[in-house]
Image (cartoon, grey):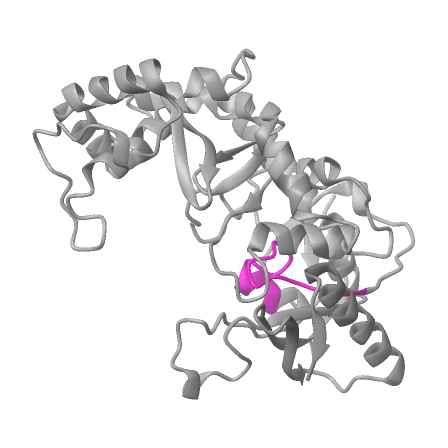
Amino acid sequence: MVHELTRTEARRIAVRAQLLDANRPDDLLEVIRHLTFFQLDPTDAIAPNAHLVAWSRLGSSYTRAELDTALEQRKLVELHALIRPAEDMKLYRSRMAEWAAGSDTLLDWQQHRNGWVMANDACRRDILERLAASGPLPSRELPDTCAEPWKSTGWTNNKNVTQMLTLMTSRGEVAIAGRQRRERLWDLASRVYPDEPAVPVEEALRTRNQRRLHSLGIARAKTQQAPVESWDVGEAGEPAVVDGVKGEWRVDPAYLGGSFKGRAALLSPFDRLSHDRKRTTELFEFEYILEMYKPAAKRRWGYFALPILYGDRLVGKLDATTDKKAGVLKVNAIHQDVEFTKTMSAAIFREIEDLARWLELDLAS
């Protein structure tokens, strides 16, 4: 059967799936296992994305040390700028083995990059030998013995070692073992990932689609391609249509029915509730663009404006910045997409106060 949903029902499914309703979780690992990953981004206008996503779910009881400790203990691992539960690596290693074998299942661009690795196989082997003897190491301490340089019109041109490490990660040969400040430390993948049997590729893809849908609640079977991690969910879940929105969706039946109680939340610009801007427009009727790359004069909402969730609606944007020297969280503006009631304003202001408390900053406006 095809489930017929109103926009309100679809939004509530999405909010519950992203752990942003009133039933707040209280365990970091529980959150990341459910969401499947935290995206890493170096922007620290308020807080780095991974920490901001964790705070949005857990509140000010969450500390950055929790995430750092879980990474140090290898309960979590980093793969292509995404922090994942370590046990999930078994869902990726079969695909990595296909990269390493040069399987004909690889796309043309993947085959091309694999060809570059093979053209520089001596460099690849030098890196593996150095890591085996002395890892973990930063990329600057690894040898560049590439015979054929990496060619690009962008910043990666001739960045042979970093490109080799990225592709060796895709091949399951090396992995990020930790960080010194923001600098990545590399080691053999066998020392970083759990020693568990890899799940066969097709089964792994089905499982990843199912888990992705469970974390999103409702999604398209097919949508635009996203770097690293897909936004679509294939045939996971059950078909659904949303009143007033064209096309078919996939919904996780676990979220159908039941009561909903929402809350106020401040979201990272990279938050998975609103990461797919087309989905956000269709379900939440909410316009958002990250404006940090725009000239200041052309920004409508601010350098790193946080989407504001209230109940099942995205209702505005918070333009705030931190001044760590002065010890303040400065609220530059609150942009209301809908007129805030007194109840809404009070709940949203409590979240802003909680954000300042978590950052250990005074609130200023």
The residue positioned farthest toward the front in the image shown: 325
From what the image shows, is residue 173 above or below residue 307? above
Residue drawn at (54%, 17%) of the image: 199
Give, as a single range, the part of the protein colored magenta: 264-281
Q: Is residue 73 magenta?
A: no
**Residue 246 location in percent, x, y?**
59, 64
Front residue (pair 298, 349): 349
**Residue 234 location in percent, x, y?**
55, 39
**Residue 250 location in percent, x, y?**
65, 46
The residue positioned farthest toward the right in the image shown: 259
Front residue (pair 123, 141): 141
Residue drawn at (82%, 56%) of the image: 21
**Which of the 4 image quarters holds residue 11?**
bottom right
The N terminus lies in which quarter of the figure? Answer: top right
**Residue 300 location in percent, x, y?**
52, 84
Left or right: where does residue 164 sit relative to residue 345?
Answer: left
The answer to whether residue 7 of the structure is visible from this angle is: no
The answer to whether residue 267 of the structure is visible from this angle is: yes
Q: Is residue 265 magenta?
A: yes
From what the image shows, is residue 292 above or below residue 48? below
Residue drawn at (66%, 63%) of the image: 267
